Image: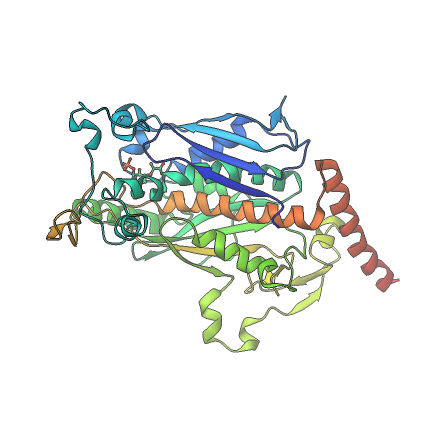
Amino acid sequence: MPHFTFRTAGESHGPALVALVEGVPAGLPLLAEHVDTQLVRRQQGYGRGRRMQIEQDRMEFLSGVRAGETLGSPIAMLIRNRDWTAWQEIMDPAPRPEDSTDAGRKRQLTRVRPGHADLTGLLKYDRDDARDILERASARETTARVAAGAVARCLLEVLGVRIGSHLVHLGGVEVAARADWPEDINAAADASPLRCLDAKAEAEMIARIDAAKADGDTLGGICEVVVRGLPVGLGAHVAWDRKLDGRLAQAICSIPAVKGVEMGIGFAAARLKGSQVHDAIAPISAEVDIATAARRGFVERATNRAGGLEGGMTTGEPLLLRVAMKPIATLMRPLETVDVRTGQRADAAAERSDVTAVPAMGVIAEAMTALVLADAMCEKFGGDSLEEMRRNMDAYLARIASRAASRDA
Ligand code: EPS
């Protein structure tokens, strides 16, 4: 039974998106601007289409927050779609009147796009118009995930956990390897057009985006999520569905267009020997403060190829995830398909879309990571109030410190 859960609802061109978060302890400071800041971050990134100029996502709390603090009750959040005004007739929930023109049937999509949910969704749900599928399959839905993730992020931050991400690959261009990250990864990444920390590689990526746009094509890429400050021992080795790596993989791979996630060195580990993969363990340096040392179990590793996970549990080293996104399926120079109305060959529909949304995907991956980690923190430390959760966490870390102290005595 998950402890910290969320649901989203809403169609891309419907009136609004909704996020419902449950399991947040009472007493967590939470302001609309904490959520809005994350929504704005998701809307950035070179290569996005006109829709991002139409939307200026802002969240309204409907429940669960009072006077700037959570109540422990479900938190419902509403984000209106500005584009709704242009789509009201097409997306109207009411049945069309008998004497209506066919305006409400405008924007039907039957030339299903390869790589999108259009065709399989239409067959599975027995619909004639792929709009009934694509409106929900649209990555617009991730707005609501980022809103939910912002709540998770607030909880993690007050417990000393920081999440950042940056783009490491786009359209065939790789960033240069780096030994470390800036102290505030997001402050640095958000200041650049693609959320990339390598300006030289980024210039080449931008040129490729421009070229892909001119060709009516799209580009995919990879983002790295980095989480610092996690205590050792979140997740559990004892059951398949409590393993944190499995929970993270599920959450990350559920992001639209994401095709894979690597933890630490990921797939590269399969091609190396054990001695080249596993991170040797050493006593922690005496310079590290006690609170940090306790989170890391009073040990340190010179390398972190495991990406902060061993046995389905956090090690206390930074959690490292690399998330791969395929190119967006809507191509302005479309692939061939079948028109489901006629059964004949046709060019796939070319709806307004983005050339790439990899920078936004990094922000979404942060949100999904935050949601999984908030759940794991609530599972480990429980508590109906933030103070109770903090006490439980402090007691756990104090026990780890006392183990080390009694051993050293
Ligand atoms: C999307 C298509 C585009 C994107 C949209 C995802 O929307 P539209 O069809 O209205 O131009 O802009 O992303 C968002 C609206 C968003 O907020 O991220 C798609 O088909 O997935």
Q: Position of residue 273 (x, y in %)?
A: 52, 78
Residue 156 quadrant: top right
Q: Position of residue 204 (x, y in %)?
A: 29, 50
Quadrant for the C terminus, please.
Answer: bottom right
Identity of the residue drawn at 60% across and 26% down: 65
Which is more toward the observer, 147 or 86? 86
Q: Residue furthest front?
A: 98
Residue 41 quadrant: top left
Which is more toward the observer, 36 or 299? 36
Image: 81 above or below 239 = above
Number of numbered discs visible in the structure rendering: 0
Which is more toward the observer, 252 or 362? 252
Q: Residue furthest right?
A: 409
- Relative side of 15 to 21, left or right: left
Colour mapping: rainbow
Q: Position of residue 201 (x, y in %)?
A: 34, 52
Ligand 1 - quadrant of the structure image: top left
Residue 313 seen in this snapshot: yes
- Relative side of 354 to 146, left or right: left
Q: Position of residue 85 (x, y in %)?
A: 29, 23
Residue 191 seen in this snapshot: no
- Relative side of 296 to 327, left or right: right
Image: 101 above or below 194 = above
